[in-house]
Image (cartoon, coloured by chain):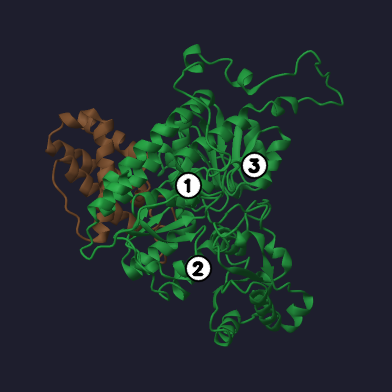
Chain colours: A brown, B green
Amino acid sequence: MTEEKQSEYMELLLDHIMKKCLWQFHSRAWDRERQNEHILGMTCDLLCGEEIVPSTPEDKCYYADALDLSRAYRNKFGWLDDLSAQEIRQVMQALREKLDYLTITGSLNEELTDTHY
Amino acid sequence: MPYHLFKCSESIPEREKHAVIKGEGEDLSDALPLGYLNTIPGTLSERGCAYCGAKHVIGTPMKDVIHLSHGPVGCTYDTWQTKRYISDNDNFQLKYTFATDMKEQHVVFGAEEQLRKSIKEAFAAFPDIKRMTIYQTCASALIGDDIEALANEIMDEMPDVDIFVCNSPGFGGPSQSGGHHKINIAWVNQKVGTVEPEIKSDYVINYVGEYNIQGDQEVMNDFFRRMGIQVLSTFTGNGSYDDLRGMHKAQLNVLECARSAEYICNELRVRYGIPRLDIDGFGFEPLSASLRKVATFFGIEDRAEAIISEETARWKPELEWYKARLQGKKVCLWPGGSKLWHWANAIHEEMGVEVVSVYTKFGHQGDMEKGISRCEVGALAIDDPNELEGMEAMETLKPDCIFTGKRPGEVAKKVRVPYLNAHAYHNGPWKGYEGWVRFARDIYDAVYSPIHELSLLDISKDEIPTDKGFVTRQMLSDVNLPAEVRDDPNLREYTGAIDSVARLREREYPEFVLTETGEADADASLKIGA
C-alpha cells in the first residue's frame, strides 16, 4: 500500500469518527488519550479478526464503541476487505496518530489540561 | 478555518476569536472559537446565569420535589410556559414554583428566618411531598445566609423530609454552564450514596443529561425497558429525588447531554467505577447505534435489533417523505449547548437540510469541537453571539429556518425567518424514531407555512393581490418535486397521534429478571424481544 493510499484511507476513517462519534471528545487530555487508545486499539483488533473478551466494566464500554465503529467501517468501506491485517494495522496506527493530534496535542481546546473535571 | 469578525462587532475586536467559518481542507487544529469565557463588555449576551443553569435546567426537572429559590421572586420566572420538562406525576415541578420572596429588608437584616418560614409553609402546603431543593441566588449568596445549617436544622426537626442545597448564585460562572457544573458536583457530594436502591434487573443504568423535554425521557425509557434494562435514575428529567440518591448502584451511566451532565458521570466513574457511555437520542442512525452500544455493553444485542427493526419499519417512510421536501433547505442550529452537535450531522444526512451555521450560548470549546466536526464545509460557528451578530448572520446566510430559544426566535420572526424552539420544542418529543419524524414535520411546517409569504406584505403600502392568496403547503412544497417522489406510495406524512407520550405510560413491560448468576433469563429475553 502506498503512503498516498494509506493517507486517503486514514482520512476516510477519520471523517467517519468526527461525524458520527462522540467518545473522542471527552473533556480532558488524559481522558481523550485513554479513549483513543482503547477504542481504536479494540477497533483495530476487531477489524483484523481478533476476538475480544472484555472483562471489566470499563473494557465493556470501550468494546461497545469499538464494535459499533468496526461494523460501521466494514459496512461503509468495502476496500477494507482487500487489505491484509498488517495493512489495516498500518492505517489504524496512522489514524490514531492523527486523531491524537486533532483532539489532544494539536487541539486548541484550552480546557484540556484543567486538573479538575 | 478563518476566524470571522462580524461587521456589527468591529468595535469589539475580541469577538473575532469567537466565530469561525469551517474551511475546505482545514481542521480543528487551524481554528476553534473561544468558549465558556466571561461575556465581553460591550456585547449583549443571550446567556442565562449560573443560578438558571443549576435550577431551571438541571434541578427543577426532578419531579417529586419542592424547588425553593432563596431569593427575590423574579428569580423563579422560568416555569410552566417556558420550560417543557414534563413529568408523569401531573407535572408537579412545573405547576408550582416557590421562592422566599427576599426583599430589601432581608438583604439588610438577613433572610434565614424568612427561609425557615418558607420551608415550613411549603411542606405544609404540600404534605405529600417530602423532598426539597433550595437554590441559592445572588441576593442570598451576597448576604451570606447559611442555607446548609438551616436545612440540617429543619431535617432534624422534621425527620421525614430530606433537603438538598444548591449553592449556585447567578454570578457563579460566565453562563448557565457554571451552574450545571455546581449542581452536578453538589448532588454527587451531598446525595449520591444516601439511599440503597432496589435492583430489579441484571442490566442497570443511570440515564444522565436527559431532561424529558415534552417527553424525550419517556420515549428513551420505553426503549430501555423493552430491552429489559432497569433505568435506576434519570438525571434529571422526570427523575425522582430518591432514585437519584441511589445512582451509585448502576452498572453504566448512559450520557446524553455531555455539556450539562458529564461532570456527574465523570465523578461516578472516579468514585464508584461506573463507566460512561455517550449516546445520541436524535436521528435514526445515531439512535440505532446508541441502542446497539448499550445492548453490547450488557450482551443483549438481539433485543436492541428487534426494537431498531420495528421502529425503523414504522417510521422511516414518514421521515423520507419530509426529507424529499426539505432537501437543500438552509438551517441554522442555534441552541444553547449540546444540540448543535447532536443534530448537525443527523439532520443533514437524514432530513437533507444544509446546516449553514451552528452557535452555542453557553457551550465550551469541547462542544464546538464536536459541532464543527459534524458540520459540512462553509458552516459558520459562533460562540456566545450577541443579538446583532445573529441578525447579521441571518441577513448573510438567508436561512430557511433557525432552531433556537424563545428570545432570539422572536427576533428572527421579525425579519421573517421561521424559527423552531430548540430548547422546549414545538410539537415534541423529538427524540426517538417517531420523535425525529415529528421534528421533521415541525421543520416542514415552519419552512412552508404560507404565513411567512403573507407576512412579507406590508398592508400599509403594498398592493395586496386579491385574485390569489389561496395556497396550500402542498402547492409550496411539492411543486418542484419529481412525480415519482411526489406520488411515491411508500412515503407518507406523519401519522402519529397529537400526544405520542401518553400511550407509553399505559404500556406493559415484561418483568425485570434478576438472576443470581447475572445471566438473563431466556424466557424473559424472548418475551422482551417480542
- From the image, tell me which residue sits under label 2: B241
Amino acid on which disc 2 is placed: Tyr
Evaluate whether label 2 is on the same chain as label 1: yes
- From the image, tell me which residue sits under label 3: B389
Question: Label 3 to label 1, Cα distance in Å?
Answer: 18 Å
Amino acid on which disc 1 is placed: Met
User: Which sits in the foreground, B41 or B336?
Assistant: B336
Q: Is B204 situated left or right of B438 in this image?
A: left
- From the image, tell me which residue sits under label 1: B368
Q: Is B276 situated left or right of B325 in this image?
A: left
Residue A57 position, x and y percent, is 26, 60
The numbered mark, 2 or 1, whose residue comes first in the sequence reads 2
Q: Residue at x 43, y 49 (%)?
A: B222
The numbered mark, 3 or 1, whose residue comes first in the sequence reads 1
Residues at badges 3 and 1 in contact (C-beta under 8 Å)? no
Q: Residue B264 carries which label?
A: none
Question: Label 2 to label 3, Cα distance in Å?
Answer: 41 Å
Q: In which quarter of the image is the C terminus of chain B?
A: top left
Can residue B397 be spotted in the picture?
no
Residue B425 position, x and y percent, is 59, 44
Label 2 SS: helix
Label 1 SS: helix
Evaluate whether label 2 is on the same chain as label 3: yes
User: Which sits in the foreground, B325 or B161?
Assistant: B161
Evaluate whether label 3 is on the same chain as label 1: yes
